[in-house]
């Protein structure tokens, strides 16, 4: 993976390095194949193709996973925090390429590295995801992601993903 994030951004044409407007849930759903209960991004606050994305997840007690994790003290599973980070990364990747994914486009995990969970995420929290492209090469993307609640880091890690056509 020798291509840098600036080279990744140049593939997007004129939108590289330019901040784009907020994406509401309807726009998010155009870029992700996930649906309830696995659609974990509610809104995109900012995206700079080839560089970074900021996105939100509003965590409510109505989330299906709280029925079993844990009913007496609900905590959002860490793997779902990482999944939400990857969903934000997928939007960033498609925006960087300047393409709209179709029903055959999917982003798969290839690796999850240096991941740390620093704070429980509970009902009522608002998770803010900050994901940056570290590098990309031949359809393999590496990102650094941070999930925060307010100013507190809830989780962070590096994600490596591959965009595939089914």
Image: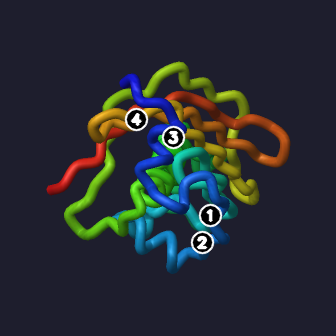
Judged from the image, the secondary structure of the residue bearing numbered disc 1 is: strand
Foreground tag (4 vs 3): 4
User: Which picture quadrant has residue 154?
Assistant: top right
User: Which one is in front, 27 or 61?
Assistant: 27
Query: Badge 1 is on which residue?
Result: 44
Residue position for label 4: 136
- Mark 2 or mark 3: name the one nearer the start of the chain: 2
- State yes or no: discs 2 and 4 in contact (Cβ < 8 Å): no
Can you identify the residue that label 2 sits on?
A: 23
Residue 2: give x, y in percent of width and height.
39, 23
State which tag comes first along the sequence, 2 or 1.
2
Q: Is residue 82 above or below residue 36?
A: above
Q: CA distance from mark 2 to mark 3?
A: 20 Å
Earlier sequence position, callout 1 versus callout 4: 1
Is residue 142 among what the camera can see?
Answer: yes
Dot 4 alpha-carbon crowd within 10 angstroms: few under 14, some 14 to 19, many 20 or more: many
Within-10-Å neighbours for mark 1: few <14, some 14–19, many 20+: many
- Residue 161: which quarter of the image? top left
Disc 4, SS: strand
Colour mapping used in the image: rainbow
Q: Residues within 10 Å of mark 2 (few under 14, many from 20)?
A: some
- Residue 38 visible? The answer is no
Residue drawn at the location 66% of the way across and 42% of the way down? 147
Residue for badge 3:
82
Given this view, does label 2 or label 4 mark the residue nearer the observer?
4
Q: Are marks 2 and 1 in contact (CB under 8 Å)?
A: yes
Q: What x and y, as percent, mark residue 52?
A: 61, 47
Residue 126 relative to residue 111: left or right: right
> Residue extending furthest left?
166
């Amino acid at each position: 993976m020798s291509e840098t994030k600036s080279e990744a951004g140049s593939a997007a044409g004129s939108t590289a390095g330019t901040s784009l407007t907020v994406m509401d849930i309807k726009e998010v759903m155009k870029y992700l194949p996930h649906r309830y209960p696995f659609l974990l991004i509610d809104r995109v606050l900012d995206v700079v193709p080839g560089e970074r994305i900021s996105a939100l997840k509003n965590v409510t007690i109505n989330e299906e996973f709280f029925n079993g994790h844990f009913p007496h003290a609900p905590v959002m599973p860490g793997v779902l925090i990482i999944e939400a980070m990857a969903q934000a990364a997928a939007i960033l990747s498609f925006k960087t390429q300047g393409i709209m994914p179709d029903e055959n486009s999917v982003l798969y995990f290839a690796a999850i590295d240096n991941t740390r969970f620093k704070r429980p995420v509970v009902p009522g929290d608002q998770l803010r995801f900050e994901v940056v492209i570290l590098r990309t090469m031949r359809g393999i993307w590496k990102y650094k992601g941070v999930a925060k609640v307010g100013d507190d880091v809830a989780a962070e890690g590096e994600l490596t993903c591959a965009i595939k056509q089914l």
